[in-house]
Every structure is written in C-alpha cells, then in structure tokens.
Amino acid sequence: MSLIHLKRRQFLQVSGLSAVSLLLGGCGTPAFEDLVGQLSEPLNRKVGKLIFNPQKPVPEFYLSEIEPEALIVNTFRSTPIIEPENYRLIVDGEVNNPLSLTLAEIYNLPLTSMIIRHVCVEGWAAIVQWGGVCLREIIALAQPKANVQYAYFKSADGYYESWDIASVLHPQTLLAYEKNGEPLPIDNGAPLRLAAPIKLGYKQSKWVTKISLVSNLSQFKGYWEDQGYDWFAGI
C-alpha cells in the first residue's frame, strides 16, 4: 500500500512516531526524554507537514449528529475568572500590526460555524458545533512578517501551546465563542478557545488571551508536549 493511501494515524503507526510518543510518556528519565525529543521532533514536524494539506477542509457532520453530552470538561488547573468587559486578545510577536482586541471587535468579524469531531488523546471523542471567527482573519489583521512559522497561545489559566502556522491558517481553525449554537460556557473555554478538526484536543487551548507569532520555537513547545506528547498532534 502506498503512503498516499494510508490514513494519518496509520502512517504514524507505520513510521514509528506513535511508539516514540508512547515511550516519551512512559519513561521517567528527564535526560533521556530530552535526547529522544531532540531526535524525534524534527522528524515529527516533517512527517506532519508531509501529510497535512493546509487548505483542504475536513468533512463535517449534520446537526442531528451533534453529541451535546459527550464533550468532557478537562481542566488544567482551575477555571479562570474572566470579566468580558475587561478582556483583550493580544496578538504580538513578529508582526507589523500588533493587536489588542475587545470581544466586541472580535464579534464584529465574520462568524463561521462548523460541526466537527473533537478527539481527545485519552480515547474519547464528541461531535460538536463550534461558532466563532476563523483564526486566519485575526492573523491577517496582525500582518505577520514573512518569516513567521509558528504561533504560541497563552491562556488565562497558565496553559500554553504552539502550532505550526499552516495549521493556524487552516480554514476550519476557529477562535470559538459559541458551542452548539449557544454562547460558549466558561468551562469549555469562554470567552475564546481554539477549535479545529485537524488537531487533538490538547492542542485546542481554552481561555485564550494571547497569540504570539514567531519564526522559531523556544525550548517550551506546549504544556503536554514538554512532558513528551507529540507536538504536531494532527488527526
């Protein structure tokens, strides 16, 4: 069977990358984790880039297929308290037009809705309707410099993540403020959270307050990735 006919998950299994991620999650020696991470990360990124089409939409589901009770609430620390009137989304880094957007300004941008499957690395999934603004709309407003390759996301609870810029600009990557046609609940990440059908759940940060566009990743890639989880985490 040629690689082009392999599903992403099958390809990762064949390539051995899933085994590396599993090994990282289970070994307890920090020095060994660092060594394996350094060896596997460049390959991980190349494989993810090879099999990811940054413009191809993922098939969506019907309204009747939404699973309202299936989305499990996972918390990193505790649910932060965010006053909507004081909230600002900061977009900075290697950009020509840094942003500090109010919720009203974000709500005035075109609304996009999609019904997708949210997949958790813990083994559960839920079909959810998300509504919000395409992240690439906000990135365009910030006018990123030509050398930008990644985006860092910081959350009000201290959680942090990083994505490749192609995934950030995918047409189905949203900053969501609605869930199943209703305002996004605070437990699910209000006022703004990442939602996308192309990444595992731990990449989809809740309570996003800051996006930094950069040309290089620091040694800190993401809360779970820094503990051995796969960085690209594409599905």
Image: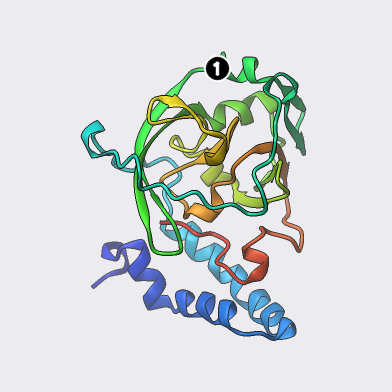
Q: Say what amino acid the circle numbered 1 marks.
A: Leu
Q: Residues within 10 Å of mark 1 (few under 14, many from 20)?
A: few
**Picture quadrant of residue 91:** top right
Residue sitting at x 37%, y 42%: 56
**Image height of 67 relative to 6, above or below:** above
Residue sitting at x 49%, y 27%: 132
Which residue occupies the foreground of this view, 172 or 215? 172
**Picture quadrant of residue 155:** top right
**Image height of 5 relative to 56, above or below:** below
**Quarter the N terminus occupies:** bottom left
Q: Position of residue 101 (x, y in %)?
A: 70, 22
Query: Which residue bears the numbered disc 1?
Result: 109
Is 188 situated left or right of 5 in this image? right
**Image height of 155 relative to 46, above or below:** above
**Image height of 64 relative to 35, above or below:** above
Which residue occupies the foreground of this view, 142 or 19? 19
Residue sitting at x 27%, y 70%: 2
Residue sitting at x 74%, y 25%: 99
Q: Position of residue 62 (x, y in %)?
A: 23, 34
Is 126 situated left or right of 106 in this image? left
Q: Position of residue 166 (x, y in %)?
A: 54, 45
**Quarter the C terminus occupies:** bottom left
Q: Position of residue 119 (x, y in %)?
A: 40, 54
**Picture quadrant of residue 221:** bottom right
Under circle 1, the secondary element is loop
